Image: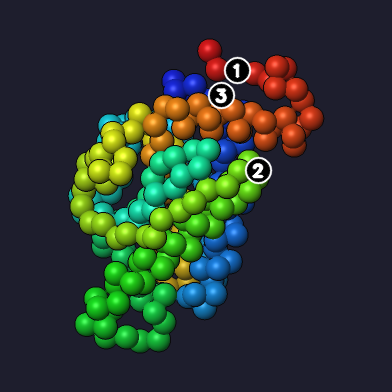
């Protein structure tokens, strides 16, 4: 769904996809160092949806049980970033990160640490690249690993009340050891989404040289 129901134009969504692509590409280089294997990422597909729609998207495409690494970020834009995997794929990712031929017991024991490290690499790489290109700074929290269904991941937290929008990013991770599909979601409230829209508009103006007033706007 590429609709601009929440105020972002197709051009702005495309610019966000470009920024996310730069971010995850940089992060993939770091992940490759961790797993000692080639890491390929599909071109991100970016949409902006409500939390309820995000729950439905994940519910339709994945089994009920999910594992996610979450980090809060604050600055000109405040919110929560999630790196989400089907729980059935999490052990494959841990095996790739740990390397060698660890026993199942070792993998289970190291799962939390390996997932947090992976999430930290990918989320910080993505958020850092986006912030740098938007000429802003973001401060991120330490990664937390959480388990649950899609409704659990997008529910309100003590640090972030119910969000008004979700920047939902679908990425296919391909590691030599197996196919791991992942999602990145950024939960933003409406003030942060409006701030993001302005920052992306300024970014488009810088790279295109076209004044913001002449850019197409969402209806």
Nearer the observer, 3 or 114: 114
Earlier sequence position, callout 3 versus callout 2: 3
Give the image location of residue 206, x and y in percent: 74, 34
Which of the 4 image quarters holds residue 90?
bottom left
Earlier sequence position, callout 1 versus callout 2: 2
Side of 176 relative to 205 (left or right): left
In this rendering, does residue 204 appear at all?
Answer: yes
At horizontal 72% and vertical 30% (from top left) the residue drawn is: 205
Does dot 2 land on a helix, a strand or a loop?
Answer: loop
Name of the residue lying farthest toward the right: 209
Q: Check contact, mark 1 vs mark 3: CB within 8 A.
A: yes
Does dot 1 land on a helix, a strand or a loop?
Answer: loop
Compared with 175, 157 (above or below) is above
Name of the residue lying farthest toward the top: 219
Give the image location of residue 108, x and y in percent: 24, 76
Side of 99 relative to 107 (left or right): right
At horizontal 64% and vertical 18% (from top left) the residue drawn is: 216
Does dot 3 land on a helix, a strand or a loop?
Answer: loop
Q: How far is mark 1 from mark 2, CA to CA?
A: 22 Å
Foreground label between 1 and 2: 2
Q: How far is mark 3 from mark 2, CA to CA?
A: 21 Å
- Disc 2 marks which residue? 135
Q: Check contact, mark 1 vs mark 2: CB within 8 A.
A: no
At horizontal 67% and vertical 35% (from top left) the residue drawn is: 203
Compared with 202, 136 (above or below) is below
- Disc 1 marks which residue? 217
Residue 9 numbered mark, or none:
3
Looking at the rendered image, the quarter that the N terminus falls into is top left
Earlier sequence position, callout 1 versus callout 3: 3
Nearer the observer, 204 or 38: 204
């Amino acid at each position: 769904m590429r609709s601009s129901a929440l105020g972002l134009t197709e051009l702005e969504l495309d610019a966000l996809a470009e920024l996310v692509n730069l971010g995850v590409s940089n992060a993939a280089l770091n992940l490759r160092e961790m797993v000692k294997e080639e890491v390929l990422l599909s071109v991100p597909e970016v949409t902006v949806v409500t939390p309820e729609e995000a729950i439905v998207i994940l519910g339709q495409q994945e089994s009920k049980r999910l594992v996610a690494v979450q980090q809060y970020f604050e600055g000109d834009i405040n919110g929560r970033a999630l790196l989400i995997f089907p729980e059935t794929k999490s052990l494959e990712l841990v095996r790739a990160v740990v390397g060698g031929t660890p026993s199942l017991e070792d993998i289970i024991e190291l799962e939390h640490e390996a997932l947090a490290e992976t999430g930290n690499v990918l989320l910080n790489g993505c958020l850092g690249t986006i912030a740098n290109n938007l000429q802003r700074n973001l401060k991120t929290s330490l990664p937390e690993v959480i388990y649950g269904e899609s409704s659990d991941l997008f529910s309100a937290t003590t640090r972030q009340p119910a969000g008004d929008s979700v920047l939902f990013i679908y990425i296919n991770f391909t590691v030599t050891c197996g196919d791991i599909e992942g999602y990145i979601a950024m939960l933003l409230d409406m003030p942060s989404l409006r701030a993001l829209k302005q920052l992306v508009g300024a970014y488009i103006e810088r790279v295109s040289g076209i004044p913001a007033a002449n850019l197409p706007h969402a209806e």
